[in-house]
Image: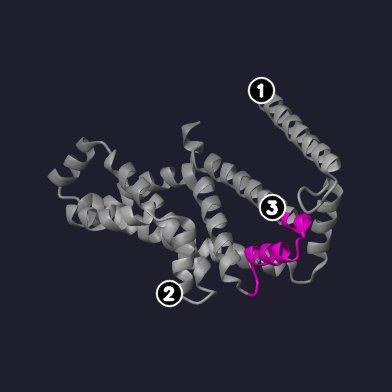
Amino acid sequence: MMKYSWKSRLYTLLSCIFFIGIWQLIAVIINNDIYIPRLEQVLEAIKNIFGDKNSLKIIFSSFYRTTTSYVLALIFSMILGVLATVYPFFKYLMEPVNSFSKTIPTMVLVVLSLVWFDKDSTPFVAGFAIIFPILYEGIRNNLLQIDKKIIDMTKIYEVSLKNNVKKIYIPTMKFYFMSIFVSTFSLTFKVVIAGEVYGQPKFGIGSQIQVEKVNFNTPGIFAWIVIIVIISLVLEFLNKLLRKRTYRWSK
């Protein structure tokens, strides 16, 4: 297993090097950094970004908006997911809201948020509105898969809803959450950045990308893309640590 793990990582590294080489080759052939910048230009742009005293504030502002949107969406989806599982009324109540939220395009939602809210609130609203229906539907479907015999037993012994939530629903939701954390948080991160591009709050990765676009600074845009990818990789690594800790009982 260890050999396979190291071999897999080596192949992944070689694949990354291959595509970076292709990128550099195309950039050299085109020789126009407005279209595709060379690797050294992107690295220089990253250096300039972190040379700015506000660079960390910009990154953490986007991360704060993402975290706030995600946590609020997670809390509401857990509460409504449990209610929809226990009480059919909430299931039917949420169906039109959930369907509307899932079908509306992200950019339309961002534009509507700009109409209804101020520019600083738009990234929060967009992030929440996009990720909430995904989390809600996933949690509800996961809870519905709980063995019916267990549910019937709780009814026979008249177990309270509070104990059901504590002993059955929360552990079920916890394992589901661990399996989808990276993908859903990364999606929220992307939507929040899109909201920042349009909303233009004072500090935010999306705001900086828009500034680089206006200035035709493609290396700067690529530099922010690289930073976003690095943040996503860090989140994936943290998620693996959390999953190992959560599933350690299975060993």
**97 on left or right of 249:** left
**Secondary element at tag 1:** helix
**Observer-nearest residue: 213 or 231?**
213
Answer with mark 1 or mark 2, whichever residue precedes in sequence: 1
Disc 3 residue type (three-letter): Ile
Tell me how far mark 1 sits from mark 3, CA to CA: 30 Å
Name the residue that disc number 1 marks: 4
The residue located at (18%, 52%) in the rendering is 88
**69 on left or right of 98:** right
**103 on left or right of 147:** right
State which mark lies toward you, 2 or 3.
Answer: 2
Magenta span: 202-221
Name the residue that disc number 3 marks: 225
Name the residue that disc number 2 marks: 116
Q: Compared with residue 199, is residue 37 higher up or lower down, i.e. above or below?
A: above
Q: Quadrant of the N terminus?
A: top right
**Observer-nearest residue: 214 or 93?**
214
Tell me how far mark 2 sits from mark 3, CA to CA: 29 Å
- Residue 16 in the magenta stretch? The answer is no
Residue 57 in the image: state x and y as whole percent.
69, 69
